[in-house]
Image: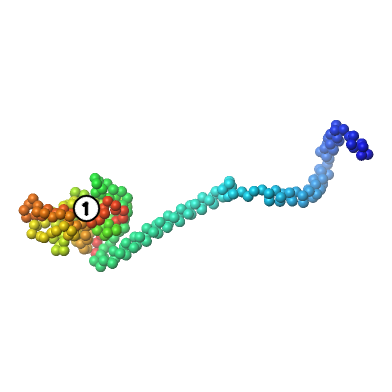
Amino acid sequence: MKQKWTRLSKRMLFMYCMLGGLIFLFSPPRITGKLQLAYARLFTWPLAKSRKLTLISRPATAPQDLASTDYRTLKTQNRRLKNDLANLTAQLGEARAQIDQLAQMRTVPEWEFMRFLPATVVATSGRGRTELIINRGQEEGVTEGSYVMGADDHSIIGRVSHVSPHVAKVKLITDPTSVIPVEIGQTGVQGLMEGNKIGLVPARHAIKPGDPVKARKMPGFLDVAIITAEVAQCKPGDEPLLLDITIRPVSDIANLMRVFVVTSGK
């Protein structure tokens, strides 16, 4: 019998396989269904083991290599939350800085009833940076003529010359067209500061370089006089009875970034 199987030709083997396949193909469904279930029961365990071995031997896939929509969505949300946290941290730092500056200003008793509105310089204009644009306007209570103070050195640097709902233009004391009533030195000699000059000061007053120049108290704008500049030079003017006084700002106007809009609280 063994010799017959050994001498079986390939053609006959093919014919047997074809015949078996046709028999299986045209067999009733109830018979083929039983054969499929028997096959499944017989090879369930080997197939399950081979699947586990395949999963174990498969290299782990890095998260960045995953193309799933869920992963991309979570990654985007995580990035957005990190950005929101960074923005809130920056805003918190800004608020703390403003609170510290306002707290320092409240230590001056004369300023107790004055209102200081924090603002940021958003742009400059005019020749030689003689005007600033700040991010406060009518909606925050800013009016034309309001004095503006440097946030770092607490000196008057100009006045609001134009205001719109959300921004305002500040004319600096360095602008030749700026006119601010001032008092000079400890004696309170009064005059008008026009740009970097002070006029209408009688020659009888003893004024010397380094004397403080303060923006004069004005009802509705300033409750008390606040420093704005200092005398740089003083000499007899063209008019015999008047002095020619040149001033310089005490604030670093060229590098201003934060200011306060000052209004009377009374």
Which quadrant, please, contains the C terminus?
Answer: bottom left
Query: Who is closer to the viewer here, 30 or 183?
Result: 183
Residue neighbourhood size for the residue with mark 1, other residues' Cα within 10 Å, grouped as few (<14), some (14–19), many (≥20): many
| Residue drawn at point x = 58 percent, y = 50 percent | 63
| Percent of width and height locating residue 237 | 9, 52
Residue type for callout 1: Ile
Q: Is residue 226 visible?
A: yes
Q: Quadrant of residue 224?
A: bottom left
Query: Who is closer to the viewer here, 66 or 261?
Result: 66
Which quadrant, please, contains the N terminus?
Answer: top right
Q: Is residue 260 visible?
A: no
| Residue drawn at point x = 23 percent, y = 52 percent | 172
Question: Given the current orientation, which residue lies at the most extreme top position?
Answer: 11
On screen, residue 181 above or below 19: below
| Residue drawn at point x = 48 percent, y = 54 percent | 81
Using residue 197 as the reference point, say whether residue 258 is left or right of it. Answer: right
| Percent of width and height locating residue 183 | 16, 60
| Residue drawn at point x = 8 percent, y = 57 percent | 203
* Colouring: rainbow
Q: How many labels were placed on the picture? A: 1
| Percent of width and height locating residue 67 | 58, 46
The residue that label 1 is drawn on is 173
| Percent of width and height locating residue 54 | 70, 48
Question: Given the current orientation, which residue lies at the most extreme left position?
Answer: 240
Secondary structure under the numbered disc 1 in the rendered image: loop
